[in-house]
């Protein structure tokens, strides 16, 4: 099955999409926050990662030590984060998190048909699409670890490479400009980039106009929305700032004159609000127009260009009527076009066409356009000192890969012949050579190989003649040592991870004693079967979830059963007041339940979005949207049941989607 995964990244946003040749004729959103684009904030929980609103809330409100926002600036700091019980450098955070979500797509959307990410590293079709505000260093910070990690079928695309042909194609040929000026927002600055409209090559250095990237109407729109929430605005406003900002930006970036919708607040309640463009003040546009006009005209003059040759293209946060008016009210008005959802969908359709034309071999997708100054499509051929630290990992050559394959085959042959000493000798030689070269591509394979060798060594113990006489055992059908049975470690690992996941769920729901008993039973069963590979994992779980003390209490002091009283935070949780419960759990130092509340808040918002989107799906009868909704709602249903919450309404909503 041919497929492709697309990761779109801006300074503050990230989205994941996928296409499979036997599925929809488009890129499908992988929705984790109830929508396509998520805030580019990351939280590490154990050995898993969360990207999106929940991570942003945990980072901004400092609810979790391993939650980070403003990724491109934060990762410059020489700090560490906690991952799978060990400290990792902060500059590895995006690589691990994006890789985790790609694996989620392979498992949750493809149902493991193509395997997991580790079995697809060299052939997985992976495309990064970078927003205009990201410079070369930031692009390489994201893409280089994947290239160095063995992802060979991947490419990095700059926004203008896809956008310019789409936009210029909508303009009559006689009216097409020679120069495309792409306008975007980076932090609080306005960014102007100049391209040849036909070849898409960069014509000059970009212009950054400080302090002009914010729409002065944004604060006013947030204030108007808050003032209109009559039954809610008596509460503290600070927890709702991100929600207000998102609603205001959504309105300002749209073309509608008035909006009358519902907001899902931080406590999960739905509040009506109304906002009109007539209520917004446009007086600040005059000074901004004069400043932008001065910088733009000066740049064109120095490069021998004039207004009649230019087309302004407003992208991202700059695609609002405010910035459109700035260019339209200049003494020499510039034709300006806002990039809307229509153009973005056309971009994705064009990309999919290119991917399919290349038969999903995406590594050379834009090789012909690599002359552009800021398009490092093949970043291996370009030496750039990134402002962000990325670990220098050597990439193995084809000769190196061939040597590893030969040595692995030699090890497996010696294992089949029951030559443990020879197998360990070759294994040590291979491991030492890989460590000397500094390769990381085979770390996981070496670990699995070591486990296999350990299991074979235990199972293939020679029985002494005296023992054989005293305890005769039936001989295998074939006495050929090459066909001696080997433990199915993959199945064993799956069962272990499934049982430990249930144990962690017991801890998160406050049933710590039950978790201790379950963990002890699992350990006893493994040791009874002479399986000791998971001892370190069991120790990590005990340490991470604080089960060591509980084990001692359980073994030494028989505790009489006592009736448990529900805490205030637990009562809030049962009432559906997830935001308050989260703050309460966080203040008590219960980070596990605070994280659980984050998941429940995200689930509640997702449920609300699917309630409001039900009529739309009914009208369009979109099968993919229906299936995504059912899948996400079933996940939310399972989450609610895990914490003993009311699930009747979710069940009814699932049935309504199934009936479409």
Image (spheres, helix red, strand yellow):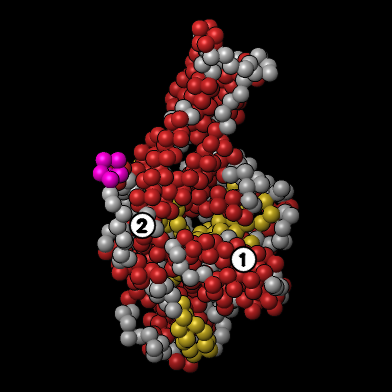
Q: Secondary structure at mark 1?
A: helix
Report helix, strand or loop for mark 2. Answer: loop
Of all residues shown, which one is farthest toward the bottom?
278
**Front residue of this view, candidates 295 and 367:** 367
Say which residue appears at 60% left-offset and 42% top-offset. 120
Disc 2/disc 1 C-alpha distance (Å): 29 Å
Q: Is residue 613 left or right of residue 57?
A: right
**Label 2, on which residue?**
510
Q: Position of residue 63 (x, y in %)?
A: 32, 62
Above or below 509: residue 449: above
Foreground label between 2 and 1? 2
As drawn, 25 above or below 331: above
Residue 140 x, y percent position in the rendering: 48, 49
Q: Is residue 628 magenta?
A: no
Query: Dots 2 and 1: beta carbons under 8 Å?
Result: no
| Front-lying residue, 114 or 215 | 114
Q: What residue span does the magenta drawing correspond to?
A: 553-558
- Tell me: 394 left or right of 219: right
- Placement of 6 over or under 572, stated as above or below: above
Label 1 sits on residue: 630
């Amino acid at each position: 099955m041919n497929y492709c995964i697309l990761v779109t990244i801006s300074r503050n946003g990230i989205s994941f999409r996928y296409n499979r040749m036997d599925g929809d004729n488009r890129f499908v959103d992988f929705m984790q926050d109830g929508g396509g684009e998520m805030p580019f904030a990351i939280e590490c929980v154990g050995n898993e990662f969360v990207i999106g609103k929940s991570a942003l809330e945990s980072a901004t409100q400092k609810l979790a030590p391993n939650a980070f926002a403003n990724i491109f600036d934060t990762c410059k700091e020489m700090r560490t984060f906690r991952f799978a019980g060990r400290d990792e450098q902060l500059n590895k955070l995006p690589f691990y998190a994006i890789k985790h979500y790609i694996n989620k797509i392979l498992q949750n959307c493809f149902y493991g048909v193509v395997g997991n990410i580790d079995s697809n590293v060299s052939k997985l079709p992976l495309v990064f699409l970078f927003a205009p505000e990201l410079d070369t260093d930031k692009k390489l910070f994201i893409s280089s670890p994947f290239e160095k990690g063995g992802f060979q079928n991947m490419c990095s695309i700059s926004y203008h490479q896809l956008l310019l042909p789409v936009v210029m194609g909508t303009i009559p040929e006689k009216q097409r400009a020679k120069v495309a000026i792409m306008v975007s927002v980076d932090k609080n600055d306005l960014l102007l980039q100049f391209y040849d409209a036909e070849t898409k090559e960069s014509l000059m250095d970009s212009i950054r106009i400080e302090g002009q990237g914010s729409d002065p109407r944004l604060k006013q729109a947030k204030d108007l929305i808050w003032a209109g929430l009559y039954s809610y605005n008596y509460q503290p406003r600070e927890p709702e700032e991100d929600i207000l900002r998102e609603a205001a930006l959504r309105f300002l970036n749209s073309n509608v004159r008035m909006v009358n919708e519902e907001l899902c607040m931080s406590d999960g309640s739905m509040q009506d609000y109304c906002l009109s463009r007539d209520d917004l003040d446009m007086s600040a546009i005059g000074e901004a127009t004069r400043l932008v006009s001065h910088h733009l005209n000066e740049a064109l003059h120095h490069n021998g260009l004039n207004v009649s040759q230019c087309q302004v293209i407003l992208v991202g946060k700059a695609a609002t009527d405010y910035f459109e008016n700035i260019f339209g009210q200049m003494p020499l008005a510039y034709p300006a076009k806002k990039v809307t959802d229509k153009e973005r969908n056309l971009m994705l359709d064009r990309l999919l066409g290119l991917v399919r034309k290349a038969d999903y071999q995406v590594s050379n997708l834009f090789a012909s356009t690599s002359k552009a100054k800021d398009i490092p499509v093949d970043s291996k051929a370009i030496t750039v000192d990134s402002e962000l630290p990325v670990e220098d990992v050597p990439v193995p050559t084809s000769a190196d890969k061939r040597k590893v394959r030969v040595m692995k085959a030699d090890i497996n042959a010696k294992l089949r012949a029951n030559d443990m000493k020879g197998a360990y000798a070759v294994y040590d030689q291979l491991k030492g050579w890989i460590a000397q070269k500094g390769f990381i591509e085979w770390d996981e394979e070496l670990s699995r190989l070591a486990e296999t060798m350990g299991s074979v060594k235990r199972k293939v113990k020679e029985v002494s003649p005296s023992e054989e006489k005293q305890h005769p055992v039936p001989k295998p059908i074939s006495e050929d040592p090459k066909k001696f049975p080997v433990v199915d470690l993959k199945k064993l690992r799956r069962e272990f991870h499934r049982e430990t996941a249930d144990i962690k769920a017991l801890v998160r729901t406050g049933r710590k004693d039950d978790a201790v008993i379950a963990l002890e039973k699992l350990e006893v069963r493994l040791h009874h079967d002479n399986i000791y590979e998971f001892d370190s994992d069991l120790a990590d779980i005990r340490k991470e979830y604080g089960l060591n003390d509980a084990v001692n209490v359980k073994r030494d002091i028989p505790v009489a059963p006592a009736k448990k009283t529900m805490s205030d935070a637990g009562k809030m949780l049962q009432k559906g007041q997830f935001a308050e419960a989260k703050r309460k759990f966080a203040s008590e130092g219960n980070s596990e339940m605070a994280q659980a509340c984050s998941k429940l808040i995200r689930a509640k918002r997702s449920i609300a979005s699917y309630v409001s989107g039900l009529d739309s799906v009914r009208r369009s009868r979109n099968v993919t949207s229906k299936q995504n909704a059912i899948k996400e709602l079933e996940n939310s249903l399972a989450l609610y049941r895990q914490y003993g919450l009311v699930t009747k309404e979710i069940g009814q909503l699932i049935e309504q989607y199934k009936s479409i």
